[in-house]
Image (cartoon, rainbow, N blue to C red):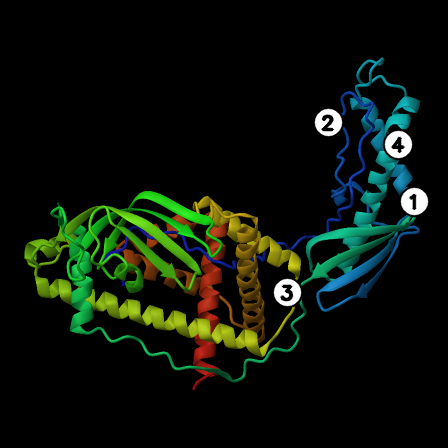
Amino acid sequence: MKEKLFPDKPEEVKNDTGDNIAGITTGMITADKPERNKNDLSTKGMAETALALDTAMVPPPNGDSAIEIEDISAIKKRAKVTIDLQKAKDILEKKLKEAAKKANIKGFRPGKTPMPIIRKYYEKELFEEAKMDVLNDVFKKAITDKKISVVGTPAVDKEMDTNTYQISFEVMPDINKINYSDIKVKNIKKRDITDELLNDEINFLLERVADTVKVDEGESINDKDRYFIKIDYVTIDKEDKVIDSAKDYLISLNSSILEKSFESSLIGKKTGDNFEFDDIERGVKVKGTVKEIERKILPELNAEAVRNFGNFKSVDEFKNKLREELESYEEKKQREALVASITDEIINLNRIEIPESIVEEDANERFEALKKEGRYAGADEKQQKDIMGILKLMAKKDIAAYLLLQRIAGIENIMVDEADIAGFYKKVGEESGVDSEEIKKMYTGKKESIANVKSQLLEEKIFDFLIKNKVSYI
């Protein structure tokens, strides 16, 4: 465990999947946008050109409107929609009147252009918009009536004739049957907190209050002392392209933070020496130069030193508290590993198709988050494509897990109630040393935060149920 002995004020709970899967929409239709007349000198502020439509504009469909929906696969559907042209013409007239009020055409005062001129400039385009209004309304009413959950954005594939269109769209998979009666996973044992492990953690904490001294010129790094080392480095891929670099980058050596294989590349090096590390797992090579070496001088473990970490009266009290926290940390790690194994097994037992549109959206959001963190700044087009491929696999797995767990919750009637939420506030308060009422105030009125808490608690209750009733160990 490399965390603060006593955590700071708790952060709001974040949830990777959340209660709402990104990409679910209410059936907006998009089509290629017609261009405006090039002679229009000022059309800003006129009727929207995009054919993603506001269905509140028009009343429910009637007359000659009709729709036929066919299944292409478990998650893909196709609709043939016939619209009422008279309704589209009625909407067109309204659009032309609105256009006339806002049109700014050379030779006429603003808002005073004769209707025949307005028709000449805008009728063709606005009629297409009017037809899309009716089309979208027919489609949206149909999927609402049929209780179809559309994901992503439905698209107009083609205009079959003047008033008939073909629309393709994706839906969430319908999980009728789910197998979770006998989930077999490996028995994951938690690590014992030995005296050696406890002493390693104590030394890690003492490093935070350690003094440092520059090593003598010509002195090399050993594998016993603890160091702060400043390096310049570049990370290159198999094609010798630089994908990451930094100057004066500070690392902590022999502190059980870095991989031992990487630390070994620095053992024996002196200030000014070059080093090289082959990261086989990532398929990259790290090359760098040692710029500066400082040895850490840890303080003696005594009553004065432990007061840096809390209001402890003795070294023994500090050690006992630290051992408790390490035990709690190991239980958390064991639980996380067990949950991951159960999740993998449920997905393996229940193969479901996931709509590509929500996978794409989820992966894009992950990639944007990584870029905001400054990751992959130097990645070229091929590397970005490879990264996106990995992120799509992660997204597909997370979404599948979310859907399957939600289905189990529905079947077993597993829900989160007010008592669960109150328990959450109390637990976070105890862990952080903050009154539970203060924790509650942090979340009150924040719908997204409360939703994340509920989602987290529901997930915990689902796995509690599975571990108790459905899991066997191999």
The residue tagged 3 is 354
- Say what amino acid the circle numbered 3 marks: Ile
Image point 21% across, 50% down: which residue? Answer: 228
Residue 235's x, y, as percent?
A: 40, 51
Residue 101 visible in rendering: yes
Q: Which mark is residue 123?
A: 4
What amino acid is labelled 4 in the image? Glu
Where is mark 2, residue-wise?
Answer: 45
Query: How far apart are the alpha carbons under marks 4 and 1?
Result: 14 Å
Residue with the mark numbered 1: 85
Q: Is residue 196 above or below residue 288?
A: below
Nearest to N terminus: mark 3 or mark 1: 1
- At mark 3, the secondary structure is loop
Q: Position of residue 413 (x, y in %)?
A: 55, 73
Callout 4: helix, strand or loop?
Answer: helix
Q: Is residue 448 left or right of residue 212?
A: right
Mark 4 Cα-neighbour bin, 10 Å: few <14, some 14–19, many ≥20: some
Question: Which amino acid type is shown beneath numbered disc 2?
Answer: Gly
Could you tell me the amino acid type at mark 1?
A: Leu
Instruction: Say which of marks 4 and 1 sits in front.
Output: 4
Could you tell which of marks 3 and 4 lies nearer the N-terminus? 4
Quarter of the rendering occupied by the N terminus = bottom left
**Mark 2 and mark 4 in contact (Cβ < 8 Å)?**
no
| N-terminal label among 1 and 2 | 2
Q: Which x, y percent locates residue 450? A: 47, 54
